Image (cartoon, grey):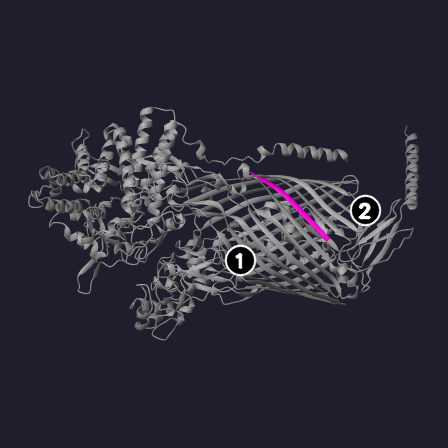
Amino acid sequence: MNRKLPNLLSFMRIIMITTVALLLSAGSFAQTQVRGVVTTAETGETLPGVNVVIKNSTRGTTSDLDGKYVIDLQAGDRFLIFSYTGFDTQEVEISGRQTINIVLKESKMMLDEIVVIGYGTVRKSDLTGSVSSIKSEDIRKITSNNATQALQGKVTGVQVTTTSGAPGAGLSVRVRGVGTFNNSAPIYVVDGFILDDISFLSSGDIASMEVLKDASATAIYGSRGANGVILISTNRGASKAGKPVVTLSSEYGMQQLAKKIDLLSGKEFATISNEIRPGSFNNVDAVPNTDWQDLVFRAAPMQNHQLSISGSTPATDYYVGIGLFQQDGIIPKSNYQRLSLKLNNTYRLFNNVTFGNNITVAPYQQRNAPGVTYSVYRAQPLLEPYYADGSFGVVYNVGNPLADLEYSNSFNNGLRGVGNVFAEAKIRKDFTLKSSFGIDAAYNKSTSFTPAYTVYNPDGTASQQDNQFSNLNKGNSENLNWLWENTLSYIKTYGKHSINSVAGFTMQKSRSEFFNLSGRNIIRDDSDFWYILPAYIMDEANNINTWQSIGNGVDAGLYYSMMSVLARANYSYDSRYIFTVTFRRDGSSKFAPENRFSNFPSFAAGWNIANEAFMKEFPILTVLKLRASWGMIGNEKILYLNQYSTVNSALYAVFSNPDASYPAATYSKSGNPNLIWESTTQTDIGLEVGVLNNRLTGEFDYYRRVTNDILIDLATPGHLGNGQGQRVTYNAASVLNSGIELNIRWRETKRDFTYSVGVLGSTIYNEVLAIGGNSGIDSVLMGGYLGNGQPVTLSRVGLPIGAFYGYVTDGIFQNQAELDAYPHQSLAGIGDLRFVDVNDDGKINGLDRTYIGSSIPKFIFGINFELAYKAFDFSLDLQGQTGNKIFNGKDVVRPDPYNFEGYLRDRWTGEGTSNTVPRPSFGGYNYTPSDYFIQDGSFLRLRNLMFGYSLPDKLVEKIKLQNVRFYVKGTNLYTLTKYTGYTPEIGGYDVLSNGIDNGVYPLSAVYSVGLNINF
Amino acid sequence: MKTFKYISILVMVLSISSCKDFLDIKPQGELTQEAFPTSAADAQLATNAVYATIRGWHYHSGGFPILDIMSDDAHKGSNPNDALNTVGPYDNFTHTSTQDGLDRWWSTLYEGIKRANVVTEKVPLIAMDTNIRSRYIAEARFLRGLFYFDLVRAWGGVPLVLTTTPPLKVPRSTAAEIYAQVETDLLYAVARLPERSTYSSMELGRASKGAAKALLAKVYLFKNDFVNAEKYALEVINGTEYYDLEPEFSHANSREGEHGVESVFEIGAFELESALGNQYANTQGVRGTPNRGWGFNRPSENLRFAFDAADPRMDATIIDLGEVLDGITIQGDGTTPDFVYDNNGNIIERECYNQKVWIPGTNTASQFGHNRRLIRFSDVLLMAAEALNENNKPADAHIYLNKVRERARNGNPAILPDITTTNKDALRDIILNERRYELALEGHRFWDLVRTNKAAAVLGPLGFVSGKHELLPIPQNEMDISQGTLTQNPNW
């Protein structure tokens, strides 16, 4: 045995070596390699990143930084296909060559990139709709938790407003004006999944964003497309030169209050107080001077880190991303952090079948500061923040904001998971069948605790800032939404005819529930005890009012199911004449069975004039395309419960002695079972121009959107018994939005020097066409409630949505003679504002209130400048708007003596001293809502300023990296505006309250440094 | 790959066929009106809900006590600037059809009517104990009568709604038609409601036969039908059910007298700042220190000096600064001047508060526990006296009038002597004045002046215009919404 074994082993070794040698030699016969360099025809430069694919296979590679590629061949491989965005694709026969150098020509149609549209893609030249794209570099340029912010000033027709500077706060996004009185936010479609927001997405994971604006583009989303659609594609696996790509980016920034509000100093306030109430302060030089803004706002760090690994093998594309976003607020005790994990895979199962997944999991934590912005604004500057013994000083009428902060504990924690799995099969070459099933799950937990605390008056008694019992609020909400989409697409070119079409069937179900609970007098203040025991909810012994402290219900906007069929055909003849027809039929559980289904068609045509024979004489024009579209789309984001007539079971009768409560229930207000979708009819005419080989490009659009059947809550006659203030929803309003959008860009490359300048602008015209019906319902909509419940917007026919409403002022009553000569309210005196008798009835009363401005800008614009020279790059983005007004709501509500804005230095102090700022008062007549509180909200903002430097390639190669770039960046560095508040970007809690500044969390300026590494 | 296609087509077909179910999602946690009320328990819930209306703030003349403010008994109150333009105008009759509170009162009365209509329309269809069912319907009709009585007194003829599904446009009925409906409802209630004592003590506060009769007597007074007013007032006074005056005048409205012998119909409320409490008293409660409320409805100098000298009811009606109540010293509000003088140095207003809503306690919430007495036995006695005088029975009128004065006298023979005059006109004035002393700040005075045609004389100096201010203007929003269906009251 012992002697035989080595023989056997050596025998086997011989066989193995022979086999390997045979295999290797066989390989050297059947498998060859092709290598080469890709260059451009125009400049002769090498082109990195060019896709090189073997025809009729899934094997391929990309050219490296020097434009070089190497690709392995198998028996039967005959052709290589070279493709690169902006260049003509080339197909080359290998014919046994081992080196194939390729010169790619810049595409005649530079715009002939592939554009992602709903349920498919289309060549830019075949696009008949209005679609704007934003580059991933621009998305990453913005330091924000929400990538949507990158659209601001970068895409025409899109207005993005940062409604609050609080970490993790949401945005207000409007596409082409405000189309409804209800939710007018666009929908987001992330890798095919329809969502309401994308706060869970790390901007580093996003490959592209496109905004679908006109009906031709949005009608495929039917009942959800009316307010625009933002399509987002996340990164998919790709290799560079056959190797996985690792990208690391890291940014660290410091935020600061971008602007302080000019408020009075202690001495100034004391002086004015003495004018209002003589003798209030004996020595105005001796009063303290507290700058509450300095005490509350701080510099705060933020950081954003992203690591991603992406690769491609013949069988698999993979992308893995990990992102960490962390932001502290400039108000203490506010912060936000989000971890996002991204996993996008594609598996090629057979030649014709692929399947894959897109998964994002994003846990987040948020801490919310109490609303101290308002109290900082109001707190009198001559009050001490702390007494000598270190206790909090009393801030009369407002509460000490530092104490509010000290005792605030408000947290949100949650998890959002969005993912889908899909399978795609190519059938008979031209058909693709795709099925995708996805889930969007969100879980949020909120906890807020305020301990019992008291701020004491100097005499030891409790001030108004007196929380006698600790309070604890806990809330849970969960949302599960699934979507199943099946599409069949057909793409075929026969000679000059080319067809790109898709049809599909989708089903969706969404459920959302919440539960919250409040308790008082929790036994200990530590977070370990932040749980609610029954004893803390029902504390009858202490006479603590705890009724209705339990909430349990569904989120009516997110509790529904939908089922739809959809179809689109895009036909192009000779790349000259293009037609698109789109159709979607949606059914939704939100409406009564007879109103449940609705159809959303659109038609569009395009003409590539530049491709006509007669245009050959004008070679300067690379692109000249005219397009027009018409279609109907809907908005179903409504609270569907309004269709039901429900029973109110939260009532009680009280009988007996001692009191005993008896449950009661009866009809609450009548619902309106006839509710249907809001429908928008949109017409769009567009012109696309490319000149000088597309160095100069331009895109112009005119649009007109009319939204009908807008759901509004209208007052009904009292005799219906719906009760005071109860409103019933009707499809009873129409709104027009129209405007012109233009986007012009010049870009040029000269050797080491590349630069581009882009200018874009959009006009918005907004008008209410109808409110109310012809019987028994109201015809105006009041809204925009101030802190004291006073409405200051009124929407009616002929005015913009949410128009400001109040008295018109016309100077100051300078003397008794003037006062006597003009109609005035009995409260008006000399030195007070003069209200205009608008209806000329000789009286000043509520009937004289009128339109005093709109928060909707007339023009929004952006100017973008980019420059790269050798290793240096620089970019500058300006953004702004004009024509919008702001209602300074925080100034007008004055039930008690508060501090004043600096403009009171120019107050009226006697005849002829001022005709703009009235005599000072702590409230009352002059603080009646009027145009005195309307300010011009126009602004020009230096939104982004960035300077970058990339290490030289040679150095980078030495350290085995591909690209290393450092940058410094400033965000929101400067805003040119006349508005006296923190920021002229004022959102609102609904479309009727936009532009009312009730004391928002201020915007911050951010100074950051960052690093990008690829290897 | 054909199988792929077939499978998907099959799936699609299957899905579409089940589409009806897929899109059928019922509202969660919400009962719809088709499914209510359907059981005996539901019937009780629906009946209780009508009572929930009268504890609501808006039920009480829209929230603020504008009826007293419009009378000579009270001014707006609170500090001078508070609600100056919203409530203030009622004080000098400069209110308009858009005045604050009008729409609240109007719509809340109709909300109550709708709740009553739910009972009258749906409860008869429920299979249950017929006695209890009959009582529920009678309770609802009593309350519906109460709501329409307020509507017709405040606005005259109004839209008459007796179903839960009225059309969007309903024109105004005449005042006579509304009164007829009130009479029908209350007669129904009188016939079917049990007496107060047959309710269990746990259900004190439900409408009773006595309450229905007392309210009916009042309705007849407003219709100048003194025969019927006398009949029903005397049925309450001399009937088998025991009602009497509280020995102590102040107890008639205070915590001590809740659901007591003098209470004919009252609104129960917890001492809680929630739906279980009633903000009626908080609205009028002492402003400042102690902080019991907003301090509206300030007793006027006119009222203060209208009382006979030494009438103890003056002190029991008005809380003055410095007064000590239940051991608490009333300090009042720092932003309210203690006195307001005219150019001649006469006091035209002083800081003082309505004592009839005072509730002892330690905090603001306690004020929410005041049980407003809608009908007191002393009111019934004075109604009887008034009707008897009108029916030329002065001697009988003296019995009931003097019973009220006797209690007010509180054992002091030196004050408030018995009334003996038999002169009909003189006695009428005396009874009207007695109503003022006895029922001041309880919401009666303005309507008493209007129904006795004395409003122009008494309130004229305050701005009252005859032919206009007897009624309130129909709320402007109702006018607008009706798009021409409603007509405005004369001279508004």
Horizontal and vertical percent for residue A711? 50, 47
Residue A585 in magenta stretch: yes
Label 2 sits on residue: A59
> Who is closer to the viewer here, A247 or B390?
B390
- Indicate left or right for B373 with A105 as reference: left
Horizontal and vertical percent for residue B142? 29, 35
For the question of whether residue B213 can be seen, the reply is: yes
> Who is closer to the viewer here, A854 or B371?
A854
Residue B216 in magenta stretch: no
Q: Secondary structure at mark 1?
A: strand
Query: Number of callouts in the render?
Result: 2
Asked where in the image residue A921 lies, by quadrant, the reply is: bottom left
Q: Name above or below for residue A943 compared with residue A488.
A: below
Instruction: Name the chain letter of the residue that bears numbered label 1.
Output: A
Q: Residues within 10 Å of mark 1 (few under 14, many from 20)?
A: many
Q: Mark 1 belongs to which amino acid?
A: Asn
Q: Residue at x 93, y 39 (%)?
A: A18
Q: Mark 2 belongs to which amino acid?
A: Arg
Q: Name above or below for residue B424 compared with residue A7.
A: below
Tell me the magenta residue range. Answer: A578-590
Horizontal and vertical percent for residue A113? 73, 55
Question: Which numbered dot is residue A766?
Answer: 1
Q: Name above or below for residue A311 compared with residue B42.
A: below
